[in-house]
Image: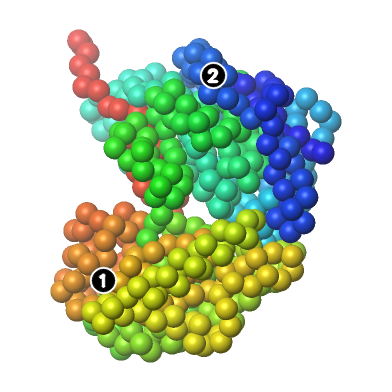
């Protein structure tokens, strides 16, 4: 069986503790991972300052060049899987392995692969956006000038610890620029998706980066918590429950559910059919597995018609084999999770009252159960709920194409939306748009018919990576 080792600052290590990841379809063992315990992680973190010194010596311009080279290696080359063995991973191997342990269709894996490639290859432009146009060579000396003003930035930490998810490889684009910012990385991969961060590391090393600036620690929850405690700055991905303990910790950037939404303003409400493709794309792209997928459509009129039209479009998205280029839906690696999600939705549907009714419009259109087992996997079929804003299902997010359609008076927008990672505001009314611009609850705002899944990586995403890793100090120098 193939084996994935721990990388203790780049050095492969096989531990006694192992985890077996099964193939989503056969449930047969597919890959074995060495697991790092908290004590091992704690010992390795003593070297953080030493490791950062190594990376700090490399000029930013050279790191940008390495990132661009790493992008091509990641996308096109055969790379090591276990550096202590001769086993390599071709790009097609990578696609099939991600699919095997997560259920994600090959086409979706390829699309996410391109996202990672895009960030690595355009990292200079990405960082220009995050630093507001700062000359990054300033990080080489720590002191410099911009428009005649002296500037100085210092690192808040000696490494960035990242606890990663298994839902979609595209999320790795968020931490990818950290290396160009001279920050060593300590990564805990998702339990079902160890492949992407490992391939990124080996792409970087092939591009010339010292192997010892990367720590790669497959681990359980205790190991992930130790990484976030031991590193000066962290990022954690997960659901509300798994990320709750880090919400109040300013050292840790939390990437949880997005509750992203499309809002059609009152001035364009009667033209809703023009935006049906936008809604379908925002809800179903990447199989509905991303925090930027729309999980709500909020309108001031025509909610019933919109819910019906959405349901009729989305129910045509059916399970297909993983290798089918038209596959959209991903099966759940654990069928029990799909059953629990479906049961939770049904329970909420039955728990409404006359003041906050809800209806599964997609079930009426489809006429079959939400859960199906086919092609050796268990799938949740796209679901459209028509409900009032007070209903629990108005603000829910799941790992499949799901959306509520909610109608409210214009006066309740955007205040009634609740916290939302992405909001697409479809309106030509500048006064209506201004309310969204002023809202503290909207993290990413699209003004106009832009899919919620269309992300500009040079914009902050649930925080700004540069500000997370660096702080500005006041500085004066005697002439």
Q: Quadrant of the C terminus?
A: top left
Percent from the top left, x then y, of residue 358? 35, 79
Residue at 70% over, 24% down: 16
Viewer-closest of 440 and 121: 440
Residue at 74% over, 68% down: 375
Examine the rendered structure and indicate whether residue 240 appears above or below residue 391.
above
Percent from the top left, x then y, of residue 44? 55, 17
Percent from the top left, x then y, of residue 103? 66, 58
Percent from the top left, x then y, of residue 260? 38, 62
SS category of the residue bearing label 2? helix
Q: Is residue 350 visible?
A: yes
Q: Earlier in the sequence, mark 1 or mark 2?
A: 2
Q: Is residue 213 visible?
A: no
| Distance in Å between CA atoms under marks 1 and 2 | 47 Å
Viewer-closest of 431 and 324: 324
Q: Are marks 1 and 2 in contact (CB under 8 Å)?
A: no
- Residue labelled with disc 2: 39
Q: Quadrant of the N terminus?
A: top right
Residue at 29% over, 23% down: 152
The circle on residue 107 is: none
- Residue labelled with disc 1: 390
Q: Residues within 10 Å of mark 1 (few under 14, many from 20)?
A: some
The quarter of the picture where residue 81 lies is top right
Q: Residues within 10 Å of mark 2 (few under 14, many from 20)?
A: few
Examine the rendered structure and indicate whether residue 114 appears above or below residue 221.
below
Residue at 63% over, 56% down: 334
Viewer-closest of 67 and 78: 78
Q: In the picture provided, is 141 more to the left or to the right than 164?
A: left
Furthest residue in direction top, as rendered: 478
């Amino acid at each position: 069986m193939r084996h994935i080792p721990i990388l203790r600052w780049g050095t492969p290590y096989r531990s006694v503790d192992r985890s077996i990841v099964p193939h989503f379809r056969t449930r047969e063992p597919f890959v074995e991972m060495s697991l790092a315990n908290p004590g091992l992680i704690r010992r390795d973190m003593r070297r953080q300052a030493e490791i950062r010194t190594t990376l700090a010596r490399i000029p930013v311009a050279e790191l940008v060049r390495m990132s661009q080279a790493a992008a091509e290696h990641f996308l096109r080359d055969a790379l090591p899987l276990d550096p202590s063995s001769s086993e390599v991973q071709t790009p097609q191997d990578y696609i099939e392995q991600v699919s095997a342990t997560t259920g994600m269709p090959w086409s979706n894996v390829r699309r996410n692969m391109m996202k990672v490639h895009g960030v690595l290859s355009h990292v200079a432009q990405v960082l220009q956006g995050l630093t507001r146009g700062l000359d990054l060579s300033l990080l080489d000396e720590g002191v410099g000038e911009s428009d005649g003003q002296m500037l100085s930035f210092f690192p808040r930490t000696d490494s960035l610890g990242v606890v990663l998810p298994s839902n979609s490889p595209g999320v790795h684009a968020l931490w990818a620029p950290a290396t160009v910012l001279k920050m060593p990385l300590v990564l805990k991969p998702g339990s079902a998706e160890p492949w992407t961060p490992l391939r990124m590391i080996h792409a970087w090393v092939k591009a010339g980066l010292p192997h010892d600036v990367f720590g790669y620690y497959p681990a359980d929850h205790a190991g992930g918590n130790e990484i976030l405690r031991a590193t000066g700055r962290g990022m954690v991905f997960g659901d509300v429950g798994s990320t709750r303990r880090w919400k109040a910790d300013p050292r840790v950037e939390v990437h949880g559910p997005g509750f992203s939404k499309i809002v059609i303003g009152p001035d364009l409400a009667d033209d809703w059919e023009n935006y049906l493709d936008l809604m379908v794309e925002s809800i179903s792209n990447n199989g509905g597995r991303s925090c930027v997928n729309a999980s709500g459509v909020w309108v001031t009129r025509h909610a019933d018609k919109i819910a019906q039209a959405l349901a009729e479009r989305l129910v045509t998205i059916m399970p297909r084999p993983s290798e089918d280029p038209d596959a959209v839906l991903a099966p759940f690696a654990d069928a029990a999770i799909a059953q629990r999600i479906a049961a939770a939705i049904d329970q909420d549907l039955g728990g409404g009252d006359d003041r906050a009714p809800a209806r599964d419009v997609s079930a009426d259109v489809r006429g079959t159960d939400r859960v199906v087992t086919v092609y050796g996997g268990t799938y949740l079929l796209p679901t459209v709920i028509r409900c009032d804003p007070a209903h629990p299902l108005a603000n829910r997010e799941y790992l499949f194409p799901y959306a509520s359609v909610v109608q409210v008076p214009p006066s309740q927008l955007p205040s009634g939306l609740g916290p939302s990672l992405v909001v697409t505001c479809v309106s030509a009314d500048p006064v209506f748009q201004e309310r969204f611009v002023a809202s503290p609850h909207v993290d990413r705002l699209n003004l106009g018919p832009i899919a919620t899944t269309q992300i500009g990586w040079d914009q902050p995403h649930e925080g700004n990576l540069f500000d997370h890793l660096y702080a500005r100090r006041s500085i004066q120098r005697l002439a």
